[in-house]
């Protein structure tokens, strides 16, 4: 009985630690995405005050205006809370370190990554290493480690074999020895960046399958910084333009989408079974619970289409569909839309504040071509990969149903 209570206390401590590391990772990703967007929008720049130049900084009041204008905050108080979160986590600071609170005033602030003062502690180093490995794996199409594989008769998409990942880390010069590579894998798992596909094992150099829990490329909403919840399932990596799920309740999920009538509405996800804890005597603890009746698996949002349309119907002369062309310039965190379906694939969701929405893209449009290449006979994974591996500026032709 005493041993049982001690084991329970250890598991609770591990759970709290894993949750803290996961929240830290999300703050780092969100902060970096914001930094890149602000550089791109020329909000961050060299500024002068009292004959002194302060490089790579932004004005507190101007940034609050920017957050509201870009729908990252509903009001100034909320915007201040968001930036205070970044300040508390040492992502940003006052240029002279004279203010420990973020103020809606004409004060200069700066991202610590822009002046070399970001504290690279052990946790931050593991996180940055994980992000670099993720990015290299996502763009390495010739020797793709992330594939659909089977373990104990169950298929897992975008999974990798531990021993093959270690081989790859050695080939890429990420680590010097297999032992060091295995230790890196264990640290990535403990920090919530990867996990065993059924959450039953720590990272081991062998045939077991693992997958990334974090999609580093997903566009984060800054409002997420104010939520203390952790993800309950690994994130989807099917599309490089994934939107943040707004609700992670066990019953269902939903996310923001721009409808054909330009209204912002909620698109409901498929219902999931009850969630049960993954802690147990036979399992290795991770902060991600699993579904009670099956291994961890994502349910894609329910299709927004009222009916499936064939390529022939889309191309019927004088038919119900007309073609539109969008030139979308990706920003620091992507293009801002989700594609789903197959032959043809369609626009499943559009980020209201992203580049795609800015040029008029809407849900339910069918993707006709990508950069001049017809994609009517392709599925959404192939189309996503075409865009992801192509230039930053993408030209999309879509077919939209006529409004008679």
Image (cartoon, helix red, strand yellow):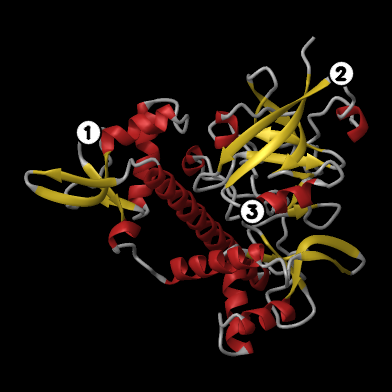
- Tag 3, which secondary structure? loop
Foreground mark, 2 or 3, reads 2
393 relative to 66, above or below: below
Comparing marks 2 and 1, which lies closer to the viewer?
A: 2
Dividing the picture into quadrants, the one containing residue 181 is bottom right
Quarter of the image where the C terminus is located: top right
Residue at x 57% of width, y 46% of height: 334
Q: CA distance from mark 2 to mark 3?
A: 33 Å
Q: Nearer the viewer, mark 1 or mark 3?
A: 3
Q: Which residue is mark 1?
A: 105
N-term-proximal mark, 2 vs 1: 1
Which residue is label 3 attached to? 390
Q: Residues within 10 Å of mark 2 (few under 14, many from 20)?
A: few
Kindly state the secondary structure of the residue where label 1 is placed.
loop
Mark 3 is surrounded, within 10 Å at the Cα level, by few (under 14), some (14 to 19) or many (20 or more) other residues, namely few
Report which quarter residue 280 is drawn in. bottom right
- Residue 302 appears left or right of 212: right
Quarter of the image for the N terminus: give it: bottom right
Front-most of 258 and 225?
Answer: 258
Rounded to the nearest whole Å, what is the CA distance between mark 2 and mark 1?
Answer: 58 Å
Residue 236 x %, y %: 70, 50
Mark 2 and mark 3 lie on one chain; the one further toward the N terminus is 2
Q: Quadrant of residue 395?
A: top right
Q: Mark 3 or mark 1, which is nearer the start of the sequence?
A: 1
Residue 318: numbered disc: 2
Can residue 27 be seen here? The reply is: yes
Q: Can residue 236 be seen at all in this image of the molecule?
A: no
Residue 80 vertical placement versus 266 (above, below)? below
Local crowd at mark 1 within 10 Å, few (<14), some, or many (≥20)?
Answer: few
């Amino acid at each position: 009985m005493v041993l049982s209570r001690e084991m329970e206390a250890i598991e609770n401590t591990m759970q709290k630690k894993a949750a803290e590391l996961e929240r830290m990772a999300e703050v780092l990703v969100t902060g970096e995405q914001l930094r890149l967007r602000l550089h791109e929008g020329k909000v961050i720049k060299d500024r002068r005050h009292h004959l002194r130049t302060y490089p790579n900084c932004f004005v507190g009041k101007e940034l609050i205006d920017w957050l509201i204008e870009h729908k990252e905050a509903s009001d100034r108080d909320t915007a201040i809370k968001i930036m205070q979160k970044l300040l508390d986590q040492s992502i940003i600071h006052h240029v002279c370190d004279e203010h420990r609170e973020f103020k809606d005033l004409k004060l200069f602030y700066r991202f610590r990554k822009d002046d070399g003062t970001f504290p690279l502690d052990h946790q931050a180093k593991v996180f940055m290493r994980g992000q670099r490995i993720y990015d290299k794996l996502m763009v390495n199409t010739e020797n793709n480690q992330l594939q659909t594989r089977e373990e104990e008769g169950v298929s897992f998409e975008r999974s990798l074999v531990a021993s093959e990942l270690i081989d790859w880390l050695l080939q890429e010069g990420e680590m010097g020895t297999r032992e060091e590579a295995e230790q890196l894998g264990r640290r990535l798992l403990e920090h919530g960046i990867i996990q065993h596909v059924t959450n039953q094992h720590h990272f081991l150099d062998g045939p077991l399958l693992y997958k990334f829990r974090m999609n580093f490329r997903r566009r984060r909403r800054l409002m997420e910084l104010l939520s203390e919840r952790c993800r309950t399932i690994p994130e989807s990596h099917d599309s490089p333009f994934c939107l943040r799920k707004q609700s992670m309740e066990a019953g269902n999920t939903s996310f923001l989408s721009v409808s054909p009538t330009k209204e912002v509405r909620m698109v409901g996800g498929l219902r999931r079974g009850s969630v049960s804890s993954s802690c147990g005597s036979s399992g290795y603890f991770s902060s991600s619970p699993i579904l009670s009746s099956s291994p961890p698996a994502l349910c894609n949002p329910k299709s927004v289409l009222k009916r499936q349309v064939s390529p022939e119907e889309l191309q019927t002369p004088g038919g119900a569909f007309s073609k539109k062309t969008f030139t979308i310039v990706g920003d620091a965190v992507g293009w801002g839309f989700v594609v789903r379906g197959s032959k043809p694939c369609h626009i499943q969701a559009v980020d209201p504040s992203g580049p795609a929405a800015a040029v008029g893209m809407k849900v339910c449009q069918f993707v006709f071509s990508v950069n001049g290449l017809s994609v009517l006979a392709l599925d959404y994974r192939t189309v996503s990969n075409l865009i992801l591996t192509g230039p930053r500026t993408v030209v999309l032709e879509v077919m939209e149903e006529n409004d008679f």
